[in-house]
Image (cartoon, coloured by chain):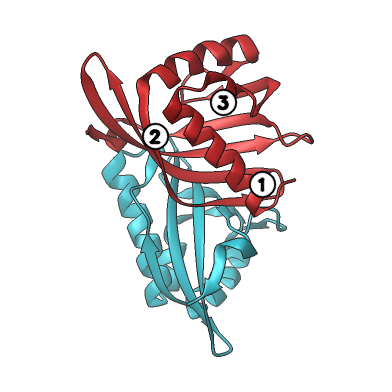
Chain colours: A red, B cyan
Amino acid sequence: MVNQQQAQAIVDQYLSSLETGDLEGVMALYADNARVEDPVGSEPLQGRAALTEFYNKAVAMVVAARSQGPVRTVANELVFAFEIESEYDGQRLAIEIIDHFVLNDDDKIIGMRAFWSDANMRPA
Amino acid sequence: MVNQQQAQAIVDQYLSSLETGDLEGVMALYADNARVEDPVGSEPLQGRAALTEFYNKAVAMVVAARSQGPVRTVANELVFAFEIESEYDGQRLAIEIIDHFVLNDDDKIIGMRAFWSDANMRPA
């Protein structure tokens, strides 16, 4: 269970780690057996090895990550809106996302779902 | 399953109905046996009678409802950030919220969870 400041610190570390390519900074937020569904509707990934592989690609692609408004947090859940800019194969895309994190008793992310679709993408 | 335009139309109707005090406009979006947890962590309400009672109070209090960015929708789920202004007992409050809707096969809301806490409130 986190308060607003602790929840915002998790979000800030998540976004700044994505932006600066800090894989360890992202992975430090996750529990070992965490489950990630990004985007919602895709096959969920589970466990440190699968998440490390996923975020290794993600941090290489993300060149900017901007919060859109404050985190909303209740008990062990938090949601927040943000926008990333990614660069891949010379193309730069902006994607507007809302993430939902569920934390375990150690305040590590045990479940993550990222809501976005092609309709939330545009050239950047 | 809704596309971006249909999802945004649901959100727009939800927010405009809250703002204009249109109880029927809100309730038309809901399935009969829908479940509402607002805020997340509170005892969920279920069924048309309970929801009508809840929204009857809500539409009376909400004086403004503003979208914060586009809806993110995948399959039968949608999330969106918004801000309401409520007036109660002469006091005006702004609350920043993120809602999560799950739709049934008829594109009616069958599950709703509203993420916000005291930390997302401020005098307006």
On-image quarter of the C terminus of chain A: top left
Chain at numbered mark 2: A
Q: Amino acid at mark 2?
A: Trp
Q: Amino acid at mark 1?
A: Gln
In the rendered structure, find residue A116 and report the number of the disc placed on it: 2
Is B65 above or below relative to B98? Answer: below
> x%, y% of residue A9?
60, 43
Give the spatial CA distance, label 3 vs label 2. Answer: 20 Å
Is B56 above or below relative to B26? Answer: below
Mark 1 against mark 2, which lies toward the viewer?
1
Give the spatial CA distance, label 1 vs label 2. Answer: 25 Å
Q: Is residue A41 visible?
A: yes
Is A4 above or below relative to A41? Answer: below
On-image quarter of the N terminus of chain A: top right
Relative to the observer, which residue lies in front, A112 or B28? A112
In the rendered structure, find residue A6 and report the number of the disc placed on it: 1
Q: Amino acid at mark 3?
A: Val
What residue is pinned by disc 3?
A: A26
Residue pictured at 44% horizontal, 37% vertical: B76
The verdict on a common chain for dots 1 and 2 is: yes
Sooner in the amino-acid sequence: mark 3 or mark 2? 3
Quarter of the image for residue B79 reads top left
